[in-house]
Image (tube, rainbow, N blue to C red):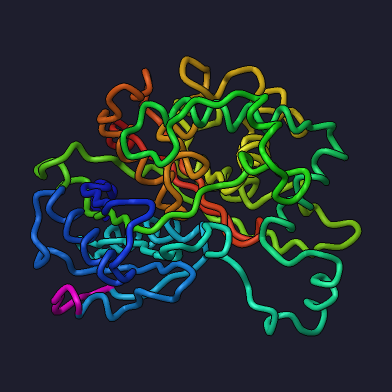
């Protein structure tokens, strides 16, 4: 079984309004960069896991585009924003079992088009509304924003969470982004700016919502024993877990109140042999400020219903007790689904965060969230080998 599994390569293309390249080309570029970052060559890969964005590309044909031969592991995975964590866990299990030795995991998407608004990138066409879906559409639930607004509103009604507390998350995340040269949004904001930003779907303001980005990110996973001899400081995998709550949006469900983090977090932490109080840094999936708040609660960093006060205390920002989304997350950094928190976790684990490097990085929690709070993945990472 070896000594464990480690992330040894990170490859990131240009991110944001990057035009003229297909998701497959972006993905191939990211894999090449990740392999080179590790000090390896493409011929060292014997596994490739692929995650695509909204356009359905790339698929497993990416292996042919890269000229990979004699792979022992090749598949396409999809749990939406939870896919990155699931891919890394699958890669680690493959390495530990001996099914593969060196696995690249990649996500790519290019929803942004020239002269097109970011909001239109995730628009769903009217022909998709039929059956019971047509009933929700008739009530105005025609977008992901509307369903997350429903979840946020339920949390507010149950626990007294306020829009200003959500704004505190947007502000702390932007403070981190200001120190990240790769972040798309770096200008400082205040809670007042958050409150004055336009409604997207009440109670969510524009500054409650993530960016839309084109680009690709890849990582390379291999055995911890091999990782010691490669080009970059290894980031070791201590634990992983998934949670798929299957909430129905109906009376009596926990939709909006409890997420898959409540399942995947304890599983990953038990595997790692750690507790919430042991975590130094969090990289949480922040498609919305609300998602950060409810994830903090479900991971046990604060009590249920206390996420708003915790965020407003300043705990998440620079100098806070729980540095969270230190690269600016998806709210201000870049939106690469679950690869956004994962990439920043690798950077922090290596100690390569520069001005934004957290003071302590012994244990880093990474979350992924997919669908409308339907899927969740958790990773526990460390610059130290497990048990060291």
Residue at horizontal 30 percent and vertical 36 percent from the top? 347
The C terminus: image quadrant: top left
Q: Quadrant of residue 49?
A: bottom left
Toward the viewer: 309 or 388? Answer: 309
Question: In the image, residue 8 lies at what x, y percent?
Answer: 21, 47
Residue 22 appears in the rendering:
yes
What kind of secondary structure does the magenta stretch mostly adopt? Answer: loop
**Rendered location of residue 134, percent (x, y):** 80, 78
305 to the left or right of 378: right
Residue 41's place in the image compared with 129, above or below, is above
Question: Is residue 129 a member of the stretch shown in magenta?
Answer: no
Relative to 303, is 229 above or below?
below
Residue 365 seen? no
Q: Position of residue 349 (x, y in %)?
A: 31, 34
Segment colored magenta: 65-73
In the current view of this chain or complex, which residue is farthest to the top?
319
- The quarter holding residue 29 reads bottom left
Residue in front for this viewpoint, 71 or 290: 290
- Could you say which is closer to the camera, residue 295 or residue 59? 59
Residue at 43% x, 32% y is 186
Q: In x, y percent, where is residue 357?
A: 33, 24
């Amino acid at each position: 079984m070896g000594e464990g599994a480690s992330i040894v390569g990170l490859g990131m293309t240009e991110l944001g309004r990057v035009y003229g390249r297909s998701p497959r080309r972006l993905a191939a570029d990211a894999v090449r960069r990740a392999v080179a970052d590790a000090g390896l060559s493409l011929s060292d890969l014997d596994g490739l896991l692929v995650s695509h964005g909204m356009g359905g590309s790339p698929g497993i044909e990416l292996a042919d585009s890269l000229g990979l031969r004699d792979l022992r592991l090749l598949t396409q995975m999809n749990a939406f924003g939870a896919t990155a964590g699931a891919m890394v866990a699958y890669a680690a299990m493959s390495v530990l079992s001996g099914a593969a030795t060196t696995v690249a995991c990649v996500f790519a998407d290019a929803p942004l088009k020239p002269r097109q608004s970011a909001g239109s990138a995730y628009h769903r066409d009217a022909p998709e509304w039929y059956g019971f879906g047509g009933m929700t559409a008739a009530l105005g639930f025609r977008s992901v924003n509307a369903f997350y607004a429903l979840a946020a509103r339920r949390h507010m009604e149950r626990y007294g969470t306020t829009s200003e507390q959500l704004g505190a998350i947007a502000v702390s995340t932007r403070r981190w982004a200001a120190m990240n040269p790769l972040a798309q949004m770096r200008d400082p904001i205040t809670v007042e700016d958050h409150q004055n930003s336009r409604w997207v779907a009440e109670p969510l303001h524009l500054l409650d919502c993530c960016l839309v980005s084109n680009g690709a990110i890849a990582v390379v996973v291999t055995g911890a024993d091999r990782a010691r001899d490669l080009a970059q400081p290894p980031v070791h995998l201590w634990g992983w877990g998934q949670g798929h709550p299957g909430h129905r949006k109906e009376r009596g469900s926990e939709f909006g109140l409890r997420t898959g983090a409540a399942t995947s977090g304890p599983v990953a932490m038990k595997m790692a042999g750690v507790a919430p109080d042991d975590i130094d840094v969090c990289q949480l999936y922040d498609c919305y400020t609300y998602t950060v708040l409810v994830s903090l609660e479900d991971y046990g960093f604060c009590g249920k219903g206390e996420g708003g006060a915790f965020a407003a205390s300043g705990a998440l920002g620079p100098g806070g007790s729980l540095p969270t989304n230190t690269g600016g997350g998806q709210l201000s950094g870049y939106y690469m689904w679950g690869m956004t928190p994962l990439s920043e976790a690798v950077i922090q684990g290596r100690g390569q965060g520069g001005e934004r490097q957290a003071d302590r990085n012994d244990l880093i929690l990474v979350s992924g969230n997919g669908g409308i709070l339907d899927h969740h993945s958790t990773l526990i990472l460390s610059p130290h080998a497990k048990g060291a």
